[in-house]
Amino acid sequence: CLPHPLDSESFMIMMSCCSKLICRGCDYANKVREIEARLQQTCPFCRHPAPTTLEEANRSEMRRVAANDRVAIRQKGTRHLSNGDYESAFDYLTKAAGLGDASAHYLLALLYRTGEGVEKDEKKELFHLEEAAIAGHPRARYDLALKEGGNERDDRAIKHFIIDANLGCDDSIQALKEYYKHGLVSKEDFAAA
């Protein structure tokens, strides 16, 4: 499988049987292989037979949710979020975040920032951004850097941008270029990013 872009979830499919994420290209390649070899379609990870109906997929996903699978719980919360059911989304995302899901922390931070389904709360937004960034969520790290820069704490913003640039975020590299032009980032730090 090739490296995934930072915003990989739009290029991924969650396997309802095991909650593993697979890129659409790998899923397609697996299906082609199975069709050509006349094999039963299965999950490339757990080899569980692929669900044939939406009801079957939902039942499988609910088993993963009941088993406290943080990815399945976050996916369920994300689905509620996109349908505008903020109360259910908040419940599922809070549970997934409690289980250590970085993307759930990031989504909760966005809810607290916008006030969708919850009261706007900058402290809770910052808490969830920090938790997501610590867990390696690149967009959360970038958002933290922007917050620090907006609060005129350039030294902290630069540290966040450097960490995020090392995670592969092009936006952070561009931000570091601007700091470098203004003499706020050393040549060594810029080169290391």
Image (spheres, rainbow, N blue to C red):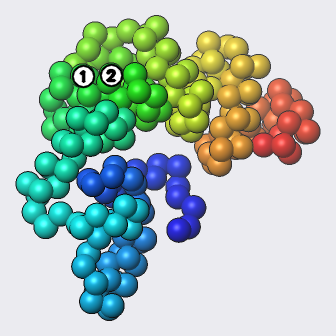
| Circle 1/circle 2 CB separation < 8 Å | yes
Above or below residue 148? Residue 42 is below
The residue at which mark 1 appears reads as 91
Seen from the viewer's position, the closer of residues 2 and 51 is: 51
Element under disc 2: helix
The residue at which mark 2 appears reads as 94
**Residue 134: % across, % down:** 59, 27
Residue found 24% across the figure and 79% down from its top: 40
**Which disc number belongs to residue 139?**
none
Q: Amino acid at mark 2?
A: Thr
Quadrant of the rendering where the C terminus is positioned: top right
What crowding class fits label 2: few (fewer than 14 Cα within 10 Å), some (14-19), or many (20 or more)? Answer: many
Seen from the viewer's position, the closer of residues 146 and 55 is: 55
Residue found 76% across the figure and 32% down from its top: 179
Which of the 4 image quadrants contains residue 130? top right
Q: Amino acid at mark 1?
A: Asp
Left or right placement of residue 151 versus residue 105 in this view: right
What crowding class fits label 1: few (fewer than 14 Cα within 10 Å), some (14-19), or many (20 or more)? Answer: some
What count of labels does the image hold? 2
